Image (cartoon, rainbow, N blue to C red):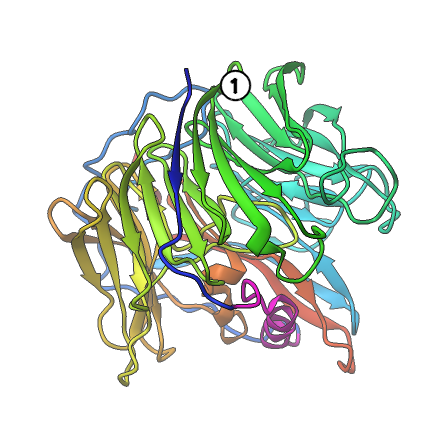
């Protein structure tokens, strides 16, 4: 029998909603990234001319196959001197033009990007522009959902609209795509639901956003009225679950398993201001093969939002009475509370994104390992500035390891690589190099992976909360999530869309 546990907020607040100056940031990024063709240089940095003597000590945390979600264990490159591995730019964006670029994925030879209603794959090692794609997959309509996860055989899932009619098109189609060759493995259509407690296929414009995730052998889609599980191999429906008013399935997290977020609204118009006060959330851990609920975890009324940075071990990020993440909660295999990590003192920052796409596991600076969760501290006010990454024990909630950025730099967790934490150190003076490092929680050792510089026009691409940042197969990629040219621009603009970095010597075999 599935188990159920509960969590209530420790306090309440009167905030008006999650802070999300998305339009302002898009404009800011566009202003900084835009430039004239050929401006900006690629800087190479390094400490000495040799490679690192350190070797990757970690092993894959779980046995993996082609139907599992990929968990790559990275190795230190043969050379820690960074060089350009890939560049994707555009030189003809018009004043006022806006392009959505949802999703970025990398394999050992392809960098794939979503661009409006198209997926494109470009060969790593090239200086690419639109038209230089290795493959191009046009969908029927704009991409309206995606997952950051990739399977062991380099496949992923995206959602897309039925057509280009922005005001009427339904986000009701899912595609499973091979990232190496751009092949559409299969596609399927799923229902839609109107925002609120009534589920229907009516053509209204206020519709719940569907979510998509992948776990072993299954692509899962939440559509408000329930969740569907598709077979990765052929797209057949493996299972389905339903919800009844006033509850709806609103988002799914994947990886080593599936967790569905269920949202229940009572007593108020679901589109009214302050509706969060009448919302309660439940999380259901599902068996990817059957859709059966293994456990249910309930949160009390007064929680503004709940995100799922990790499915296994289960860690949730709760915004209780505030617009920011106030607590991280670790759960055991039965869905019971193991430890609550309070972030209310303001010393630490745990960020989960609120975007136009329903990704409940998009928490760029929360990295979860086997026994610990890592987040960053707030930037320190001293000049030059600095910060640190702190670890919390998932069993006790107590602090464990602390890794300092050093003066004049900021340190951000990126992802786990086996038992090591990969982190990005961003130089604040634009003189010292940026770096990708591996932090070893067991020994406090720091292993340098790459030292690199970025062109001036691309310096904001290191902002993790506003860009896609991927480490894969010894390379580091930065990609914008959207591109926009200010309406008052006088001419067409040239912009960086994706930048990739690798070691200046071939990877060790």
Question: Dot 1 lies on which element?
Answer: loop
Q: Is residue 205 visible?
A: yes
Q: Quadrant of the C terminus?
A: top left
Q: Which residue is mark 1?
A: 217
**Residue pushed farthest bottom?**
383
For label 1, the crowd category at 10 Å Cα-Cα, with few meaning under 14, some 14 to 19 and many 20 or more, is many
Asked whether 482 or 77 is in front, the reply is 482
* Residue 441 image position (x, y, % from top left): 17, 47
Query: Going by the image, does 173 lie left or right of 464?
Result: right
Query: Going by the image, does 76 lie left or right of 500?
Result: left
Residue that appears at 45% across and 68% down? 454
Q: Is residue 154 visible?
A: no
Q: Is residue 178 magenta?
A: no
Task: Choose top left, top right, bottom left or bottom right for residue 122.
Answer: top right
Asked whether 29 or 188 is in front, the reply is 188
Task: Choose top left, top right, bottom left or bottom right for residue 39.
Answer: bottom right
| Count of numbered marks | 1
Residue extent of the magenta highlight = 15-36
The vertical placement of 422 against 64, above or below, is: below
The vertical placement of 201 against 15, above or below, is: above
């Amino acid at each position: 029998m599935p188990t159920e546990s509960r969590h209530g907020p420790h306090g309440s607040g009167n905030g008006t909603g999650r802070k999300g100056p998305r339009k302002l940031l898009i404009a800011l990024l566009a202003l900084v990234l835009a430039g004239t063709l050929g401006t900006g240089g690629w800087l190479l940095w390094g400490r000495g001319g040799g490679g690192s003597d350190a070797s990757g000590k970690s092993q894959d945390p779980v046995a993996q196959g082609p139907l599992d979600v990929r968990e790559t264990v990275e190795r230190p490159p043969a050379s820690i001197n960074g060089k350009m591995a890939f560049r994707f730019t555009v030189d003809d964006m018009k004043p006022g033009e806006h392009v959505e670029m949802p999703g970025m994925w990398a394999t050992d030879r392809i960098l794939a990007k979503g661009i409006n209603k198209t997926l494109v794959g470009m060969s790593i090692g090239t200086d690419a522009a639109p038209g230089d794609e290795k493959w191009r997959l046009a969908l029927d309509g704009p991409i309206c959902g995606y997952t950051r996860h990739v399977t062991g055989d380099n496949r992923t899932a995206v959602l897309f609209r039925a057509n280009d009619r922005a005001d009427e098109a339904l986000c009701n189609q899912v595609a499973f795509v091979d990232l190496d060759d751009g092949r559409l493995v299969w596609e399927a259509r799923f229902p839609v639901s109107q925002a609120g407690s009534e589920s229907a296929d009516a053509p209204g414009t206020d519709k719940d956003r569907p979510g998509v995730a992948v776990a072993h052998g299954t692509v899962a889609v939440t559509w408000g009225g329930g969740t569907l599980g598709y077979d990765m191999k052929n797209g057949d429906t493996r299972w389905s679950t339903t919800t009844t008013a006033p509850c709806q399935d609103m988002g799914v997290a994947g990886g080593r398993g599936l967790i569905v977020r269920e949202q229940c609204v009572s007593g108020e118009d679901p589109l009214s201001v302050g509706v969060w006060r009448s919302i309660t959330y439940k999380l259901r851990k599902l068996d990817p093969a059957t859709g059966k609920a293994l456990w249910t975890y309930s949160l009390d009324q007064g929680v503004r939002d709940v995100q799922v940075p990790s499915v296994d071990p289960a860690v949730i990020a709760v915004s209780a009475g505030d617009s920011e993440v106030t607590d991280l909660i670790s759960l055991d295999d039965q869905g019971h509370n193991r430890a609550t990590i309070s972030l209310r003192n303001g010393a630490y920052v745990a960020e989960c994104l609120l975007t136009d796409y329903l990704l409940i596991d998009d928490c760029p600076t929360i990295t979860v390992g086997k026994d610990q969760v890592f987040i960053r501290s707030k930037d320190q006010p001293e000049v030059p500035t600095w910060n640190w990454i702190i670890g919390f024990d998932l069993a006790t909630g107590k602090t464990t390891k602390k890794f300092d950025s050093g003066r004049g730099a900021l340190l951000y967790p990126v992802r786990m690589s086996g038992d090591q934490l990969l982190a990005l150190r961003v130089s604040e003076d634009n003189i010292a190099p940026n770096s990708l490092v591996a932090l070893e929680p067991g020994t406090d050792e720091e292993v340098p992976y790459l030292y690199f510089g970025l062109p001036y026009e691309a310096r904001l691409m290191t902002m993790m909360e506003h860009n896609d940042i991927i480490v894969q197969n010894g390379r580091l990629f930065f990609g914008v999530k959207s591109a926009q040219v200010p309406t008052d621009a006088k001419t067409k603009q040239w912009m960086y869309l994706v930048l990739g970095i690798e070691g200046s010597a071939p990877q060790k075999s």
